[in-house]
Image (cartoon, rainbow, N blue to C red):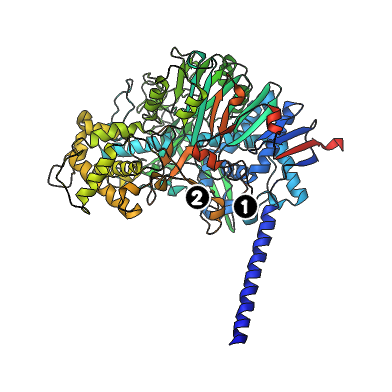
Amino acid sequence: MARLFRFLLRIATGLILLGLAVFALTYYFAARSLPDYTDTRSVAGLTAPIEIVRDTSNVPHVFGRTDADVYFGLGYAHAQDRMWQMTMLRRTVQGRLSELFGERTLPVDTLMRRLDLNGLARQSVSAQDAQTTEALEAYAAGVNAWLSVINEGARGRGAPEMWLFNHPIAPWQPADSIAILKLMALQLSSHIEDEVLRARVSIALPQERVRDILPDIPGSGIAALPDYAALVPGAAQLTDHASLGRAELGFMSPISPRTLAGASNAFAAGPERSAAGSTLLANDPHLGLSAPSTFYLARMELASGGVIGGTIPGVPVILTGRSTVLGWGVTASYMDDQDIFLEEVNPANANEYRGLDGQWLPFETRDSIINIKDQPGVTVRLNWTENGPVLTPDMFDLEAIRPPGHVTALGWTALTAEDTSMSSAIAIMQSQSIDEALIAAERFVAPSLNLTIADRNRVAMVMLGAMPRRDAAHDSQGRYPSLGYQPQNRWLGTLPFSANPSFVDPQGGVLGNTNNKIIDRPFPMHVSFDWGDSQRIERWRFLMQSREVHTRESFIEAQLDTVSYTARSLLPLIGADLWFTGDAAPEGTPERQRQRALSLLAAWNGEMNEHLPEPLIYAAWLRALQDRLIRDELGLLAREFTHVEPLFIERVYRDVGGASVWCDVIQSAPTETCTDMARLALDDALVWVAETYGPALESLRWGDAHEAVHDHQVLGDVPVIKWFVNIHQSTSGGDNTLQRGRTSGQDPTPFRNVHAAAYRGVYDFADPDSSVFVIPTGQSGHPLSRHYDDLGELWRRGEYVPMSLDPALARAGAVGVTRLAPATAQ
């Protein structure tokens, strides 16, 4: 027995030692790619020595003799910290993910090849001005300099992920940066999905009910539309089917569901509304959460002055930030810059489609080969019409709205080879006044954004991006897919930049945007029928007008505000006949639980605080209520409505246009009232809450359900590894609060925070160096770096790091200084 014990002990010891050796070896190879921030080296591509000073938060401050050298330094810093992220962005837009991940990313690659954003970016390089061309080339040289360091110094293939998905990294090119900006445009737009969903709902419901479930933002200028079936021959015979959702693209998809498209807040106050007598500006772009974060903090010392703020790795621009004299912030504009065209295919020749004059035209066609890991390559035939690239019916649920004998083509302003958005962004960044920035903004094409600007004495906002010029007689006003061969549906080019809404020196001294409707003009000058917010703007307006003058602290308070205007306005409506009514109920009964929930909500101020139970009860109630209201009318189509639409609930409970009819269940004999629906939905919600989080309502925490999930896009689901690469945090806020934490809407965790501020910045031009900013993870994309998640807890708690352009402050306590010299100086 003793001999057996010693034998087993030796085996166990050997296995432990083997495991430790494997772990140590794995750690060694993974850690090899950690950059040394205190380094001196000679590199090719520089004209003079530069310094990259990393402050205590690992924000690189790049100093050089020329602008080109500074852009070189930014590229070097981006590559040091975010090489994997940059290569994935580039592979995504090139349609080359399947070379690493196999067949599961083939749908993504197919879509990107069809859109050809990468090819258009290559053609757009020649459209940039000289300043931008120099910046792009220098930035690419900086990225490639770090790649040379990796290759020459055996630096762990550049990122730990490369050990699992090893593939040669091609040199960075100027076109790659332009392509990533185009990819951002795709990520921020949801009008394809909006058009398809509205068409599907129109097939299922009469127009008055379509206006309920897909409500127009209040305001005039919206003309009535006919049914989709009346516009498109054959559409009446289409039958709805279970939505494909995101499964059509799946893993590594660059496209979010329509409910998770781009969002943001930006607001500014002029000197007359500032306690310190100069301007204030705050900005927090909202994007899908990930590890690492979408944004990367950086500072560049250019000939025009220092600039500091948020960058996108791969793009040599401060997209949101400040200089010594100017601050700028961006929000998703929701401009309708996309249209789906239904192209009739020649029944006698599938290679032709109907043109404007009825004549059959040949598709513009070419083949593209997608290489797939461990499998033969796939040849994809790419077709373009005069209206744009042809998309396959399995994308965006196009099959559900495509009549027989037709294909669908996409019209989109970003599909141009003359895209000067990069030149515009760099010129805005280097502007010395609002007037200069407005001139620079004219060249911006896509993505369409609202640019909020402040110099020391003035504030302004302008919509960036090319706006399609549509015919006033357009069949669907761009709200439905339309027939591409009808002349009234074709785009007539783009409108002049003067047509883009702008607001300069507002009379009240304060302006802002929460993705709300900002202008009320009739079609075709309308900008959009679909906007990203109808709720946050109300809370923002209250906070701005509640003070005569503002400070940096009041702007921070507004940026972090978690009070839900939606909860305050809807709860009195849906609970009007439930508050403090009914007989006493014994403990343990559903009636008693309902009374307890209503009592909690009656005393609640609408604050979506992570430590409170009321936000969870409220959110579960509203979700269950909308599901009960729409399930019988929409059937499987109800799956598309993953988030509560506040305007729909309000229309129903105020009976706007007879909308209370939604409360009656069609399939049941009794006539249900809206009070019945509210009571039943609350019971549904309480059962779900008890099963998921326990029956003790007072002990519930919103933060347990509203956990921010910064998951690694590739390794986030891999057992064991996910515990090292994913960052999860309990958070406050919700779908409709200024501190926005958009929920997933998907079971089994419908309230997980998956879309929130990817950057927060507040700039005070009375004391510019007191400005602050933060991102939700850390600067590094390396899971073994201490800077992988070190800013995340600050972000969660609503704290910031200094945003100073003082070189002395950057050097004080710096985590490292990298000195690079031209290779010829050796």
Residue indicated by mark 2: 251
Res. 509 visible in picture: yes
Q: Secondary structure at mark 1?
A: helix
Q: Secondary structure at mark 2?
A: loop
- Say which amino acid is labelled 1: Glu
Vertically, is 769 above or below 55? above
- Determine the residue located farthest toward the right in the rendered image: 826
- Mark nearest the camera among 1 and 2 is 1
Give the mark nearer the N terminus: 1 vs 2.
1
Of residues 378 and 223, the one drawn nearer to the viewer in this rendering: 223
Of residues 552 and 419, the one drawn nearer to the viewer in this rendering: 552
Residue indicated by mark 1: 161
- Determine the residue located farthest toward the left in the rendered image: 670
Would residue 506 appear left or right of 482 to someone viewing this image? right
Vertically, is 485 above or below 373? above
Q: Residues within 10 Å of mark 2 (few under 14, many from 20)?
A: some
Q: CA distance from mark 1 to mark 2?
A: 16 Å
Q: Badges 1 and 2: C-beta atoms under 8 Å apart?
A: no
